[in-house]
Amino acid sequence: MDNNDVSRRSFLGTVGTVASGAFAFTIVPRHVLGGPGYVAPSDRVNVAIVGAGGQGMSNARALVAGGQNVAVLVDVDYGFVDRQVANSTRPRPNAPNAPNPQQANVGAQLADQYAKATRYADFRVMLEKEKGIDGVVIATPDHGHAVQAIAAMQAGKAVYVQKPLTWSVAEARALAATAKRTGVVTQMGNQGHSFDGTRQMVEWIRAGLIGPVREVHIWTNRPIWPQGIPRPTTEALYTPPRGPVTAGGDGGVRAAAGGGPNGTPNGPTAPGGAPAIDWTARDMQRTFATLMASGLTAPPPGLNWDLFIGPSPMVPYHPIYHPFNWRGWTDWGMGALGDMGAHLVDQPFWALDLDLPTSIEATSSPFGLDVDASPATYPQAMTVHYEFAARGKMPPVKMSWYDGGLMPPRPEHLPDDVVLDRSGGGYFVGTKGIILYATYGNNPRLYPASLTEQAAKIPHSVKRITVSHEINWANAIMGKAEPSSDLAYASRLTETMLLGIVALRTGQGVKIAYDAANMRVTNRDDANQYLQREYRAGWTL
């Protein structure tokens, strides 16, 4: 056995036989146990999965497939987790009606490790008791990431934090500072950063293949969960239209007699005194709230709602929140931009060597004071325009984000028979052509097609990752690799994404100027409140 393995495991505090049942093993030469696909204990890391269903289970599956040990689970709803585990053992087809034995085998291994793993509901208790773990995967709703990741890093544990890294800009900076101070291995769960397509585009841009880039467009079909709706309430809010139809028959703009909360015919006003939103949008919101009121119930057995809420303000449980749908609620998620930005903004952010933007402007379907002074969900659709300063010889860049079914304009050089994928993608606009790519940086294509021949001559200058994003992290813990997307990088990418949410909350079509050095919006002081959050008692960073 390599002596370096012994010293590494000694450093991790897991050499020899560990008393805890979940971690009991003895390091032995791999030839003693051997066998096809066998991974010796000295080539394994012991991992805790915080948020063991959903995306956390996907991360666990990749770790199990790579021979790692999922030793501990932390979740607030094991009923949901166990239902997903049961589904994981079903054969997954790799062709119509054909089972995939390899996938089924990984599912069985995952189920076995989940069955043997020590279970906790509270990550704080887990960190106090489980000293033998090497790394922590954090795949909870966005609002819990910062509290959990900082606690894990302070305990000396490597962390793999799902995207978006944090709920707020201030939290992203706090995570980066903690990672630097503790020196632990870190990774954000933007797996496209490890994919060949992303790395190929970085090489193309650096080689000047499409010329200087001043413009980038990115889009996604998200949200695929409820947004643009109010919080459930027990109050009967719905009232029928009371004013005349001013245009367009029943589908037109209504004027609500008696005025809204600001004393105007339609509620709050936009700049210049014009009504901010027509009556029908407010009517829709109130209808939704009334319909959802009937769903207010006690949390189902096994769901610890207090731990789910974590650092956010307490609200009554409703089945529309959990599972999955929390992404659209402002207390817990970051909407479509938070969900998919790390898989789509990552490519231009890296390839163009972008730093934090100098200005950001957002517009959306009804949101904020348009309908509610304290919106509970993100809008159904939004656009964000970022401006970035020049970097050395690289010119300034304007990057535009579109979600909720909105699409960018078709770029020049794109052939008529090429359709922009409505599920999501992006493109770089250079002086010589464009690069079109799919979500995660997959399937990068060059237009005009004549650029493809030139691209074939560009050497590989960016290292390729030949294992999964999760196994790259595990290998980094063992000293065998560098993490693909560590928090020094991921925190800046996350801050850029979240500044789009800050602009959205500041106001429709308001361009905010950002002083990155001081983490401050300089032209709208009211925007600075959205760079951070207040924490519920007992949940501070």
Image: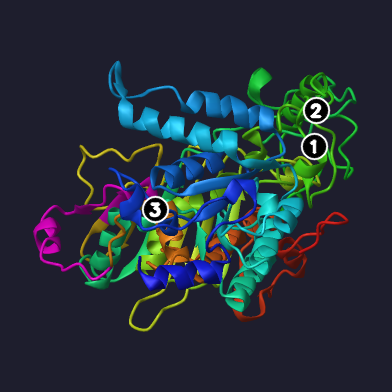
Question: In this figure, which residue is indicated by the disc labeled 2?
Answer: 299
Depicted 312 relative to depicted 381: above or below: below
- Residue most extreme to the front: 32
Question: In this figure, which residue is indicated by the disc labeled 1?
Answer: 305
Q: Which mark is residue 40?
A: 3
**Badge 2: residue crowd in 10 Å (few <14, some 14–19, many ≥20):** some
Residue 290 located left or right of residue 227 = right
Q: Secondary structure at mark 2?
A: loop
Q: Secondary structure at mark 3?
A: loop
Q: Who comes first in sequence, dot 2 or dot 3?
A: 3
Depicted 283 relative to depicted 69: above or below: above
The quarter holding residue 347 reads bottom left
Q: Who comes first in sequence, dot 1 or dot 3?
A: 3
- Of 269 and 197, nearer the camera is 197
- Residue most extreme to the top: 97
Residue 387 located left or right of residue 193 = right
Write down the region rendered in magenta.
435-462
Type of amino acid at the residue the image marks with label 2: Pro
Can the viewer see residue 49 in this picture?
no
